[in-house]
Image (tube, rainbow, N blue to C red):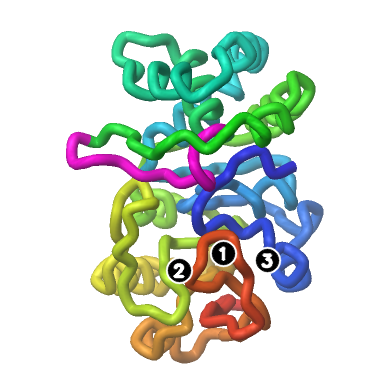
Amino acid sequence: MKFLRYPGGKSKLLSYLVNHLPKNKDIKGTYIEPFVGGGSVFFHINPDKALVSDLNPELISLYKGIKLYPHKVWETFESFPSGKIAYYDIRNKGTEGKHLHYKAARTLYLNRTCFKGMWRHNSNGDFNVGYGGEERRWVITHQNIVELSKTFRKAEILNNDFEDVILNASKNDFIFLDPPYKPGEKDLHELHYRNGKFLFDEQVRLAETLKSLPKSKRIRWAMTNSSHKDILSLYEGFHIKKIPFGTSDKPGIQTKSSNEVLITNY
């Protein structure tokens, strides 16, 4: 299920992606996702053994909190008052000294009630997206959180750099990569992403890391990325498919003129 509103998420591309990705039964090793974000592909494949990571500490606390304390997360999420005043009070108080289950519930609450699911922070690192309403909050149920916990219990959840995650892959693992990117562009400069940017030098480091994987380990990988020519040039010799529909310049709106590609080593 899609329980998180997350910029750059792949839920709307799943109908295309699933035709080019292995099914759970075809993954002999561990399913690895270094940029897990909203986790659409991870949840769809539902692997028996997984390792997921992201540099967004709030996101990782959310996933760990649901994994370990699903009932406490739900009780806290449910206890938060409704309305604009309550939203700003909870947002501005922060999480210093709070238990993991509270951090998880707060992140979920803010994500479900903030404006358009944006994930923007000020220069001090504080979440600063405005209020968006309550209508999307109660799409989530207690049972959803319990089911998510069961899925997360099959996964190791990390807050690590992508290079560390990729280089620790073992024989027959499968890696799905969805690095931050703006369709058709070389660099990403976006305030609604937790880390703010993903520049071309990071794209180069990502490509070099993937190319360094020993062929003897038979590690398969698939990646969604921008179709910018400089990014494509990093993957000469690999299989590159244009994604037939994708994200437009307007958040949440799809376009038939995709500037996104799927790159695989198989």
Q: Is residue 149 left or right of residue 132?
A: right
Q: Residue at x 33, y 16 (%)?
A: 93
**The residue tagged with tag 2: helix, strand or loop?**
loop
CA gap, disc 2 and disc 3: 30 Å
* Above or below 170: residue 124: above
* Above or below 49: residue 33: below
Position of the N terminus by quadrant? top right
Majority SS type along the magenta span: loop
User: Measured from the top left, where is residue 196 in percent x and y?
Assistant: 29, 54
User: Nearest the camera: 32 or 229?
Assistant: 229
**The residue tagged with tag 3: helix, strand or loop?**
helix
Kindly check if marks 1 and 2 are in contact, taking CB atoms under 8 A apart as contact: yes
Residue 218 visible in the picture:
no
Marker disc for residue 13: 3
User: Measured from the top left, where is residue 45 in percent x and y?
Assistant: 73, 51
Q: Is residue 114 left or right of residue 174?
A: left
Kindly check if marks 2 and 3 are in contact, taking CB atoms under 8 A apart as contact: no
- The magenta-colored residue range is 113-124
